[in-house]
Image (cartoon, rainbow, N blue to C red):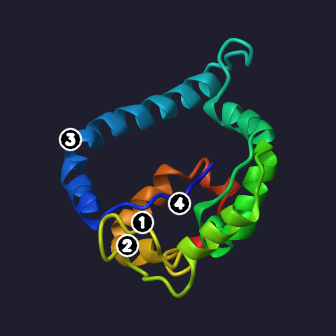
Amino acid sequence: MSAIVPVPPNTLRRAGRRARDWAPAAAVLVAGIVAWQGLVTAFDIQRFLLPKPTEIATALRENWTFLRHEDISREPVPAFELLFATLGVEFDDSIRHGIAEHSDPGNPVELRESHDIRLDSRAGVDSWRRRLSAGDIERIRIGVADVAPAFYSDVDW
């Protein structure tokens, strides 16, 4: 499930500097999942003993509601209306108005102040293309190759 979370610009810069601190742990996690998938496949371990991570993801996908950030950003009111209905939460006019007001195309594209959360959500959909290098995008694409096809096509990259 995705959500729109406002992040102050200086937080992104600090996170980038701290990436070197958490990147090794993230690499170990990803390597562990890849090894798990490989071992289950290579040694034909029975599913009831140790399912593959992709099988777990498939099972979760069947029972979960997934909303892509891009879809929420492009159509925020209908996306949140669907989410509220799925969760059995009332979606009234005040909520509809609040979402529309905070994601309106007339709002700024970039944060002006760290506590201002009113943005043009539609304009932010492709901001990652401006902020990431081609190498970063390729690295991410390779890292999520097992899961991404369930959510994205080649055109999305």
Quarter of the image that includes the C terminus: bottom right
Near-viewer residue (39 or 111): 111
Q: According to the image, label 1 marks what residue?
A: 137
Q: Residue furthest bottom?
A: 106
Q: First in sequence: mark 1 or mark 4? A: 4
Residue at 31% across, 34% down: 25
Q: Are marks 1 and 3 in contact (CB under 8 Å)?
A: no
Q: According to the image, label 2 marks what residue?
A: 134
Q: As drawn, is 141 to the left or to the right of 77?
A: left
Rate crowding at label 1 as few (under 14), some (14 to 19) or many (20 or more) other CA atoms within 10 Å. some
Q: Amino acid at mark 3?
A: Asp
Q: Amino acid at mark 1?
A: Ile
Residue at 80% across, 43% down: 88
Mark nearest the camera among 1 and 4 is: 4
Mark nearest the camera among 2 and 4 is: 4
Q: Amino acid at mark 4?
A: Ile
Near-viewer residue (70 or 145): 70
Residue at 43% across, 64% down: 138
* Residue 84 tag number: none
**Tag 4, which secondary structure?**
loop
Q: First in sequence: mark 3 or mark 4? A: 4
**Tag 3, which secondary structure?**
helix
Whole-angstrom CA distance, mark 2 to mark 4, is 24 Å
Q: As drawn, is 14 to the left or to the right of 114?
A: left
| Residue 87 point in image, percent of width and height | 76, 43
Q: According to the image, label 4 marks what residue?
A: 4
| Residue 152 point in image, percent of width and height | 65, 63
Q: Amino acid at mark 2?
A: Ala
Near-viewer residue (139 or 95): 95
Q: Are marks 2 and 1 in contact (CB under 8 Å)?
A: yes
Rate crowding at label 4 as few (under 14), some (14 to 19) or many (20 or more) other CA atoms within 10 Å. some
